Amino acid sequence: MSTSAVEVSGEKVKVIWDKRLIKIFCNICIKEILKGNRPEWKAWKKLKGKDTGLGWNPIKRTVDASDDW
């Protein structure tokens, strides 16, 4: 489980990302990619870079993250 803060109507709200929400988010991303809606390469590169602590597993073709992430 991970937490982050987002701004909603000018107010910061704490968001808890549990396994269920992560799965929903990933499914939405997959559907959008299949429809041809692809993220910008720079944003993707930043996501899997040092800024977030994530990595990329080229063999599995998956994002690598620590258990804490």
Image: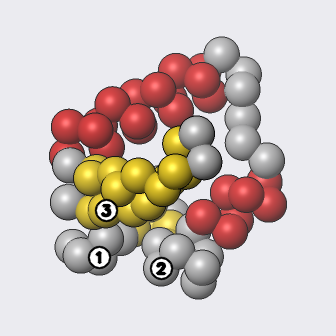
Taking the spot 47% from the left edge, 26% from the top edge, the residue there is 28
Residue at image mark 3:
3
Establish if 65 lies above or below 16.
below
Which quadrant of the view contains residue 43? bottom right
Decide which of tag 3 and tag 1 comes sooner along the chain: 3
Establish if 42 lies above or below 17.
below
Mark yes or no: residue 62 visible. Answer: no
Establish if 17 lies above or below 56.
above
Q: As shown in the figure, which amino acid type bears the numbered disc 3?
A: Thr
Taking the spot 39% from the left edge, 62% from the top edge, the residue there is 4
Left/right of residue 68 with respect to residue 32 in the rendered view = left
Mark number displayed over residue 53? 2
Front label number (3 vs 1): 3
Local secondary structure at mark 3:
strand
* Cα–Cα span, label 1 and label 2: 8 Å
* Cα–Cα span, label 3 and label 1: 14 Å
Mark yes or no: residue 34 visible. Answer: yes
Q: Residue furthest front?
A: 10
Mark number displayed over residue 66? 1
